[in-house]
Amino acid sequence: LFCSLQLIHKLESNHQHQAPKLIPRNNANNNHKSKVSAMLPRKLSWQGATHASSLSSLPSSSTSSIRKKEQAKQSRLARGVWSGRVLFIFILASTGAFLGWGAHHVLSNAEMEMMEQQFHVVARGALIKFQRNFLRKTEAFAILQKMFENSFADAPWPYVTMTGFPQVVSSIIQAVDGCAMAYMPVVRSDQVEEFENFAYGWYNESGYPEGLAHSSFGKGVWGSDKTLNNTDKRYHDTESDYYTPVLQHSAGAYQKFLMMNFWTNPSERASINATLQCIESRKLGHTEDNVQCTSLADTFLHPKLGPTSLGTQAIVLPQDNTTVVGYIHSPVSWEWIMFEVDENLNGMSIILTSDHGDAWTWNVENATAVLQGGGEEYFPQAYMMEDMHMMEDMHMRGESLVMNPPGVYGANSAEFTITVVPTEVFCESYSTKNPIVGMVGAVLIIIMTSFFFGVYDWLVRKESNARQELLVAKREFMRFISHEVRTPLNSVCMGLALLEEELKEQEASSTGNSQESEETLLLHSIQRNTQSA
């Protein structure tokens, strides 16, 4: 612009000192006007040039308004994009949490299902084995009972003994894995003295040691009383209302209970009473004849056998199955019944309960049932809790089975149930880290997906920002060219147009020199250079 103004001032000064060349007014005017019009913008008129000069001051306010609108539009677009990013990240995080929870839930359920199946299979197998052992051991009662009933149907009861009793019972015990057994005849009160003479005479004839079945008071049927001051705590029982003295025992001469009236012992009395009630029910027609009147008393803790129930089997006459002439008596050790424990039961608890309120608990450790104690306080937590954390949905509170089902034993006999319950040790043996690994794996997949999305988004934003910066630079350049260059050029064009008008007037007043002056040529050259620029 400065150079152009210098050239214009120089042209004016040279034009004032140089004589004009005359050209025809009309021709010169027309030719010069056409050339100048060709050099000017197509839509620019002399009046338009003046108007364009007035418009050169408008872009400052209009440009700022346009910029504000564009900035607001870009701001809204940026907020929308960032909102989309936040929403996408939230969806990814939610998906990761859901997949992690789902993987953990599915794998945990798979472990629980496997544990449940294993537990039920092992527990049911163990219970069936326990019941088989129980029935086999109590079967010894029926075998020995039948031997007495068939062998001594016409014998003068209670004066009946079995020759070789210890050997016979030993064979039965070996066959059925039973416990020691005793034979007890029923003796009336008026027969006690005669029975005592018969018993001790038979002991002597059988070669039993001298002094066998003697007590501190001498010979006779005895009972036990811990409050007595004598050495053996025994007394001569002559006033009981019912007598069931032990006449023969599987231990033979080495059994200390010979001639003891079991009716005086509360545990044995309960078992005998249940058998008598079964016989009475049979007499009244309430119990079928095929029901064995075998009864089991409540359990007690035997110093050697552990929790033990006393079993009693009534001996009746074949011709009259409602008359009891004797009993077969034997302890039932529950630990002996559970001696065959599968190693798969490790970590489980075995609970023995009865309808009379008995309760005993064993824990299986190293394929061995270890007694914990008696009472509900020894029950495992899994058996006591109604809403278990790990097993409430799996119905794993335990597998149960009745050992002496109805129809085999008397109605008044205690009904024993064994329940196998899983413990925390068993559950932990099937608990692995797979659910945690699956959950962490699912979350890591989402994290890696989010990472790659972030990298991709960063690259896209980087390229987009570069394009945006280039576009902004182009727009700024165009604004600069339009406002800072075009406006001065319009001013130059207007100045040149005024000079052209002045020259035309001078040429019109001249004498008609047809050649163009050097100033005009210079003016045309400046206009062309300006227009081309």
Image (spheres, helix red, strand yellow):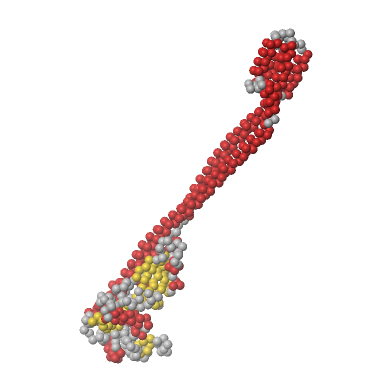
Q: Which residue lies most toward the right here?
A: 17
Residue 197 in view: no
The residue nearer to you, when weighing 35 against 100, is 35
Residue 393 in view: yes
The residue nearer to you, when weighing 425 against 499, is 499
Q: For residue 303, what is the image quadrant?
A: bottom left
**Which residue is rendered at x = 78% and y = 13% of the image?**
17
Horizontal and vertical percent for residue 210? Answer: 31, 87
Q: Is residue 313 left or right of residue 507?
A: left
Horizontal and vertical percent for residue 124? Answer: 35, 65
* Quarter of the figure with the N terminus: top right
Q: Is residue 377 above or below residue 529?
A: below
Q: Is residue 410 left or right of residue 69?
A: left
Q: Is residue 474 above or below residue 368?
A: above
Q: Is residue 493 left or right of residue 117?
A: right
The residue nearer to you, when weighing 443 against 19, is 19
The residue nearer to you, when weighing 428 against 166, is 428
Horizontal and vertical percent for residue 432? Answer: 45, 57
